[in-house]
Image (cartoon, rainbow, N blue to C red):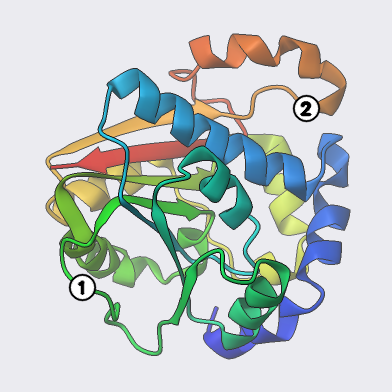
Amino acid sequence: MQAAEFDKYARDYLETHERNVRISGETPEYFARYKIDEVRRFWSQAGLTEPRAVLDFGAGVGNSLPHLAESFPDARLTALDVSTESLAVAMRRFPKIADFVCQNGPDIPLAPGSFDLIFSSCVFHHIDAAQHIRTFEGLKRLLSPTGRMIIFEHNPLNPVTRHIVAGCEFDEDAVLIPANVFKARQHAAGFAKVAVRYTGFFPGPLRKLRPLERFMTGLPIGAQYCTVAGG
């Protein structure tokens, strides 16, 4: 999907997203929150130094920004997107929460080594597969030596995920990526260590079972997965 297409959906994104995830029994706010909770849990369990700078790659209308700010209160946030309309919506929703940067070409206009954490949520299935390795190379350039890149994507092995994506108008171009393929592309871009964690096992009606999910991250049946890359 090109910038102009993202611009077309920016104003109605929240309503469209809410309508499409209704089958899960949850709201877009829940999905935005749980991803950052997962990032925060990993960061704490790994004993990593608190990040000084965090990049939200493909920030869109800013759903993740308040949760990143809450979970990493001492970090400077940068929201990057190709869609000027989406960034405008994000700035109206969350003024002064981050530096908002528009990417107008293939190269990311940010300084090398300037981020300790790079986060991205369900962006790469909109990027042409032929550009994935180059994009990962660009993101690797932005990481500090001890930084981590944590990326969430839809799991094509999950039938509910496939159903939701198939019915979503701004996912018309989506090509879902198997976790092993996604991991291999990050290795090809120069990341020495890439781990896969599956998430989103229980829908809203079964939310009481969600404490079990932290023990299920190796099961490839979650609605989404995330990769944690470094080195």
User: Relative to 143, is 62 above or below?
Assistant: below
Image location (x, y in percent) of residue 194: 24, 37
Q: Name the one closer to the observer, 28 or 203.
A: 28
* Image quadrant in which the N terminus is located: bottom right
At horizontal 79% and vertical 64% (from top left) the residue drawn is 14
Q: Are marks 1 and 2 in contact (CB under 8 Å)?
A: no
Taking the image as shown, residue 110 lies to the left or right of residue 119, namely: left
- The residue carrying mark 1 is 111
At horizontal 87% and vertical 45% (from top left) the residue drawn is 22
Q: Name the one closer to the observer, 92 or 155.
A: 92
User: Relative to 212, is 153 above or below?
Assistant: below
Label 2, residues with CA under 10 Å away: few <14, some 14-19, many ≥20: some
Residue 203 disc label: 2
- Sequence-earlier tag: 1 or 2: 1
Can the viewer see residue 224 in this picture? Answer: no
Give the SS element for disc 2. Answer: loop
Identified by mark 2, the residue type is Pro
Can the viewer see residue 72 in this picture? Answer: yes
* Of the two numbered discs 1 and 2 in the rendering, the one whose residue sits closer to the viewer: 1
Residue 40 disc label: none
Label 1, residues with CA under 10 Å away: few <14, some 14-19, many ≥20: few
* Image quadrant in which the C terminus is located: top left
User: Relative to 18, is 155 above or below?
Assistant: above
Taking the image as shown, residue 64 lies to the left or right of residue 192, namely: right
Image location (x, y in percent) of residue 4: 60, 90
Identified by mark 1, the residue type is Ala
Give the SS element for disc 1. Answer: loop
Taking the image as shown, residue 132 lies to the left or right of residue 201, namely: left
